[in-house]
Amino acid sequence: DAGITQSPRHKVTETGTPVTLRCHQTENHRYMYWYRQDPGHGLRLIHYSYGVKDTDKGEVSDGYSVSRSKTEDFLLTLESATSSQTSVYFCAARGGAVRNEQFFGPGTRLTVL
Amino acid sequence: EDQVTQSPEALRLQEGESSSLNCSYTVSGLRGLFWYRQDPGKGPEFLFTLYSAGEEKEKERLKATLTKKESFLHITAPKPEDSATYLCAVQAEDSNSGYALNFGKGTSLLVTP
């Protein structure tokens, strides 16, 4: 695995509150991703990063922003949380051109009341 | 637009009863097709990547195959510990999302003793 950890693992917050989720990897992978997983949907891409300070939007990016100031850390921020952002959030890292596998973290369960 | 459809949505097997899960896909150009296993409350665990039609990969009781339109995950003589949700995902060749994966909704497998 890519040694991916996520924090917090669980969070309950209120509508309108800013929330930041953290993803940390120990394998120096260039590409990192944030996905969300909801019942009735497959995992959906929120944002991704292809290097330090290099990020781009995914399929469901509205209401989310990301930052990557170091190779090992990728942060996902909900500027003003809404109930529709209640979900399980997964971070992933890509093992490189030769090792094309994407490895996932354990997830963060976020509930917005 | 890339699409991934998994069937069945849920499958219940007796221990030792072999079966197959299906993943049909449409993508402009396939870079890779991925299979993951996901246990409740955990992140997806990488199983296989297939790159070209005719390719096969095996791991214990699991065997993944690939054609130009679909992939099968064959489970031979399953055990209760094989119970999980199995996810299929495609990676497009001309990906403009940093090689992110496009996931199906998964097949929930239950193997009873």
Image (cartoon, rainbow, N blue to C red):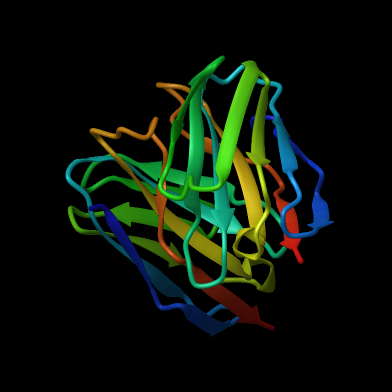
Q: Is residue A45 above or below residue A72?
A: below
The quarter of the picture where the C terminus of chain A appears is bottom right
Is residue A17 or residue B100 the one in the foreground?
A: A17
The quarter of the picture where the N terminus of chain A appears is top right
Is residue B4 or residue B68 the one in the foreground?
A: B4
x then y, percent, for residue B87: 48, 59
Is residue B76 or residue B80 the one in the foreground?
A: B80
x then y, percent, for residue B103: 42, 55
Q: Is residue B64 above or below residue A27?
A: below
Residue occupying the point 17% across, 45% down = B28
Q: Can you see residue B102?
A: yes
Q: Is residue A4 above or below residue B36?
A: above
B27 vs A85, left or right, is left
Q: Quadrant of residue A111?
A: bottom right
A44 vs A7, left or right, is left
x then y, percent, for residue A33: 54, 36
